[in-house]
Image: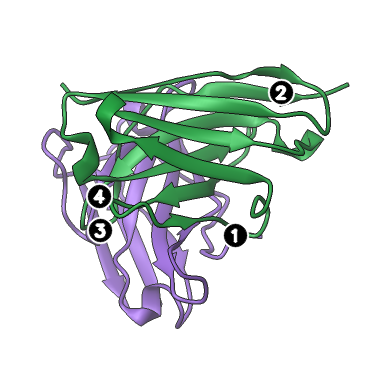
Amino acid sequence: EVQLVESGGGLVQPGGSLRLSCAGSGFTFNDYDMHWVRQVTGKGLEWVSSIDTADYTYYPGSVKGRFTISRENARNSLYLQMNSLRVEDTAVYFCTRSGDGGWFDPWGQGTLVTVSS
Amino acid sequence: QSVLTQPPSVSGAPGQRVTISCTGSSSNIGAGFDVHWYQQRPGTVPKLLIYGNSNRPSGVPDRFSGSKSGTSASLAITGLQAEDEADYYCQSYDSSLSGSVVFGGGTKLTVL
């Protein structure tokens, strides 16, 4: 069974840093592009970052320069280093994968990041 | 404001048919990028519902169907059931920024 399990969320002060991890199992990790998507409670889905199989990385303007996505294929793991966190970064962060077709499946259970003083 | 535009809410009685639109532009759906749909029931994680505009993953009932034309896509649900009450999101890519993933704002389906 394909599984993605996120960890590393928590409470952090504005301006602080946090590192999220996502452990993949049940599939050949390095064959897939990996992504982070977040969701503010009661709101919609927002793409946060992507890393493809060649380690090219992509970010929307809202997090570019503050967040860094990386992967460690030997450990079947995806990471998101979040620096200079803002109150508006508060959300549940999901890890997900995509193949050549570009759809996201499956999704992890999510990890909650709360940025507050 | 989401790059892909969805109606905030739709509703229908059990057994009825509803459609959810997803409107983009020439830099995303109109540029030929596929549209994918996700269902998120309350308190759960998003689940892939339709991929590649009109394909259903194994286990998704054939009551769900997708289509794409021009700069828009649609999700249709026939024979509405109470369990279909959920949020639905469309997703695609945008050529204006390399690798840019775009989502619709989501549509809340209420089964009356």
Classed neighbour count for the residue bearing mark 2: other residues with Cα under 10 Å, few (<14), some (14–19), many (≥20): many
- Check contact, mark 4 vs mark 3: CB within 8 A: yes
Name the residue rendered at 25%, 65% in the picture: B67
Q: CA distance from mark 4 to mark 3?
A: 7 Å
Q: Secondary structure at mark 1?
A: loop
Report whether A72 appears left or right of A112: left
Residue at the image position 29 percent from the left and 66 percent from the top: B34
| Image quarter hosting the C terminus of chain A | top right
Q: Chain of mark 3?
A: B
Look at chain A in the picture and name its colour.
green
Q: Return the residue at label 2.
A: A114
Question: In this rendering, is residue B42 above or below A62?
Answer: above
Mark 1–mark 2 distance (CA, rounded to whole Å)? 23 Å
Image position of A17 with respect to B8: above or below: above
Q: Quadrant of the N terminus of chain A?
A: top left
Say whether disc 4 or disc 3 marks the residue closer to the N-terminus.
4
Label 3: how many residues lie within 10 Å, few (<14), some (14-19) or many (20+)?
many
User: Label 3, on which residue?
Assistant: B66
Quarter of the rendering containing residue B5: bottom right
Between circles 1 and 2, the one closer to the viewer is 2
Q: Amino acid at mark 2?
A: Thr
Subunit that carries the residue with mark 4: B
Mark earlier in primary sequence (1, 3)? 1
The residue indicated by pointer 1 is B2
* Amino acid at circle 4: Ile
Any idea which chain is the purple one in this picture? B
Residue A101, percent from left and from top: 22, 57
